[in-house]
Image: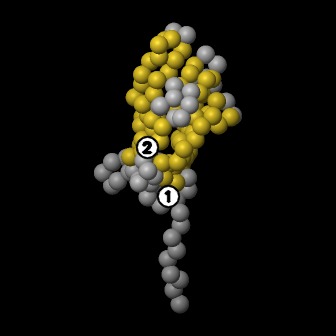
Amino acid sequence: MAKAPTATAAAPLVLTFILSSQVSIVTTVTGDARQYANVAIQNGSITAWSASLTQLNNSQQLPYDIVAGQMTIKKGATFTLTVPTSSQQGFVFSQMTIVTPENPDGQQYGIQVASWPLSSSI
């Protein structure tokens, strides 16, 4: 007797965008269609903030300033998920203001912090 095919979940993808020597944005992508993303701002080994993004709840906003040494990521930074399709990679895009001693009034950035294909192999 033949066995019925079994579905296996795709292994998580972990993608790191380095903002500075101390701060990274780590995106963990899961789901059979790579449709879920957990975004975390890491200050060294400490998670300063994290949020889950889904196709139905695809945007999250930073609720407070994150101060890491001489760099501050300002409250209100947004992270938006676009799920992958057969014709387009998935990605997380962030709009944020970063304050440093060189830019005390803040510098605005629009950054694609992660991208991945629909298939489980990169």
Q: Residue 61: percent from the left, percent from the top?
A: 48, 37
Dot in front, 2 or 1 = 2
Q: Residue 45: percent from the left, percent from the top?
A: 69, 34
Tag of residue 66: none
Q: Secondary structure at mark 1?
A: loop
Query: Mark 1 highlights which residue?
Result: 31
Q: Mark 1 is on which residue type?
A: Gly
Q: Image point 44% across, 50% down: which residue?
A: 57
Nearest to N terminus: mark 2 or mark 1? 1
Label 2 crowding class (10 Å Cα cut-off): few <14, some 14-19, many 20+?
A: some
Label 2 – label 1 distance at C-alpha: 17 Å
Q: Image point 42% across, 47% down: which residue?
A: 58
Q: Secondary structure at mark 2?
A: strand
Tag of residue 59: 2
Q: Is residue 115 visible?
A: no
Q: Image point 47% across, 41% down: which residue?
A: 60
Q: Residue 52: percent from the left, percent from the top?
A: 52, 48
Q: Is residue 56 above or below residue 69?
A: below
Q: Image point 40% across, 28% down: which residue?
A: 110
Q: Residue 116: percent from the left, percent from the top?
A: 44, 46
Farthest residue, direction right: 45
Label 1 crowding class (10 Å Cα cut-off): few <14, some 14-19, many 20+?
A: some
